[in-house]
Image (cartoon, rainbow, N blue to C red):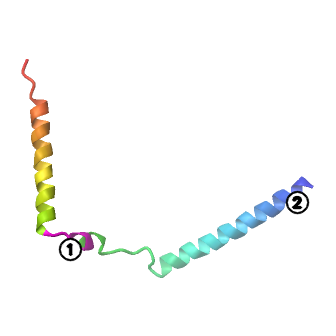
């Protein structure tokens, strides 16, 4: 009785895995995972103020790191 349950579960899992594999290959073939302009789209919508804020935050982090590194003894 237990062997038919295992056989059915194995068959169902192989069937569902096959469907998933076919769907994945179809997606690759049709270019569903292509995003050639991802980085360009992110930069395109940034304005100058946001870029300046990011640069200022980076400068603050660097100045804090320099202050923490200096420890005279």
Give the residue at the far bottom of this rendering.
30
Give the residue at the far top of this rendering.
73
Identify the disc placed on residue 4: 2
- The residue drawn where x is 45% and y is 77% is 32
Q: Residues within 10 Å of mark 1 (few under 14, many from 20)?
A: few
**Percent of width and height locating residue 27:** 51, 77
Stretch in magenta: 41-47
Identify the disc placed on residue 8: none
Q: Which residue is mark 1?
A: 44
- The quarter of the picture where residue 44 lies is bottom left
Q: Secondary structure at mark 2?
A: helix
- The residue drawn where x is 25% and y is 69% is 42
Q: Residues within 10 Å of mark 2 (few under 14, many from 20)?
A: few
- The residue drawn where x is 24% and y is 72% is 40
**The C terminus lies in quadrant:** top left
Q: Secondary structure at mark 1?
A: helix
Give the number of callouts: 2
**Percent of width and height locating residue 22:** 60, 75
**Percent of width and height locating residue 61:** 15, 44
* Horizontal relation, residue 5 to residue 58: left or right: right
- The quarter of the picture where residue 9 lies is bottom right
């Amino acid at each position: 009785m237990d062997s038919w349950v295992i056989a059915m579960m194995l068959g169902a899992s192989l069937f569902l895995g096959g469907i998933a594999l076919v769907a994945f290959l179809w997606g690759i073939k049709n270019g569903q995972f292509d995003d050639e302009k991802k980085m360009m789209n992110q930069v395109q919508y940034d304005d100058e103020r946001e870029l300046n804020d990011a640069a200022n935050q980076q400068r603050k982090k660097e100045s804090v790191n320099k202050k923490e590194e200096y420890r005279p003894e």
